[in-house]
Image (cartoon, helix red, strand yellow):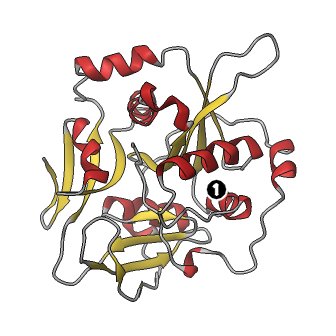
Amino acid sequence: MVKSNDRFDDNESVREGATARPEAEAASSLPTEKPIRARRRVTVRRVTEHPQFYLTAPSPCPYLPNRFERKVFTHLVGERAEPLNDLLTQGGFRRSQNIAYRPACEGCRACVSVRVVVDEFDWTRSLRRVLKTNADLERRERPALPSSEQYSVFRGYLDSRHADGGMADMTVLDYAMMVEDTHVDTRLFEYRRPGSGRTRGPLVACALTDILGDGLSMVYSFYEPDLEADSLGTFMILDHIRRAAELGLPYVYLGYWVGGSEKMAYKTRFQPQEHLGPRGWVRA
């Protein structure tokens, strides 16, 4: 399983008064995709205008047994959302809807922020095989708008891979909010098999991705579970590395790596990478 993202399971992640469109309407109103352009890096002075931070109550850790987790979080809204998200991501935060969060567990620092160094990436033989296996896939970068087709793949992925996880009960409206509730530069990377004529090919994988001043941040990715043998999760990360290189962005942010967690072990395949520690980002 390749899951390059982390969900903030807290009621604060749902925007007050937000509504999600029925899936049929969302599917029919998906706008034309816009090309991604790397944004200019902003100064710290623009991004520190009084953000308020909060601490969650302890809850069972999803990665390590017999542990409890806490998170510190803030809201990403208004004009400051994009530059603040850039700054916080560089400081080890992750985004979930309009929330930026980071682990703040007592006596534990197991969650380590990871980013891949794009220009020096090691395209090993096994990773090149993954690219070759999926060479026929077509990527389309679309606005952050949901569709029933996406939800069908998302639902199948959860039922097959995470039936007992915290996201297992997500409805189509929950999915719509996960995608739409963003105040930053967010895109959906859709991956399809080739179509015929004017008919689009079937959707097989999708990644919700933030465009940062210094990289791409993979918020959540999912794929057709019947195609697990094609290593679609790995392929999406590799394709993001290629896309970041095309855009001149130095990093791809993969979220957290937890030593000793089988769920996170796949992230070590993507080298070289940097880990965030007490002295900043260092080569792992």
Q: Measured along the vertical axis of the image, is residue 198 above or below residue 157? A: above
6 relative to 97 in the view: left or right: left
- Looking at this rendering, what residue extends furthest in the top direction? 197
208 relative to 176 in the view: left or right: left
User: Which one is nearer the viewer's eye here, 46 or 240?
Assistant: 240
- Say which residue label 1 marks: 179
111 relative to 191 in the view: left or right: left
Residue 36 place in picture, x, y as percent: 58, 37
Q: For the point 76% across and 46% down, which residue is it?
A: 148
Residue 192 place in picture, x, y as percent: 63, 26
For label 1, count other residues whose C-alpha is less than 10 Å away and answer few (under 14), some (14-19) or many (20+): many
Q: For the point 63% across and 42% down, which residue is it?
A: 153
The kind of secondary structure element at disc 1 is: helix
Q: Measured along the vertical axis of the image, is residue 136 above or below residue 89? A: above
Amino acid type at image mark 1: Val
Residue 146 place in picture, x, y as percent: 72, 50
> Quarter of the image holding residue 169?
bottom right
Q: Measured along the vertical axis of the image, is residue 93 above or below residue 28? A: below
| Residue 211 in view of the camera | no
| Residue 61 in view of the camera | yes
> Quarter of the image holding residue 136?
top right
> Quarter of the image holding residue 43?
bottom left
85 relative to 33 in the view: left or right: left
Q: For the point 55% across and 46% down, which residue is it?
A: 157
Q: For the point 30% across and 23% down, which residue is it?
A: 127
Residue 113 place in picture, x, y as percent: 27, 58
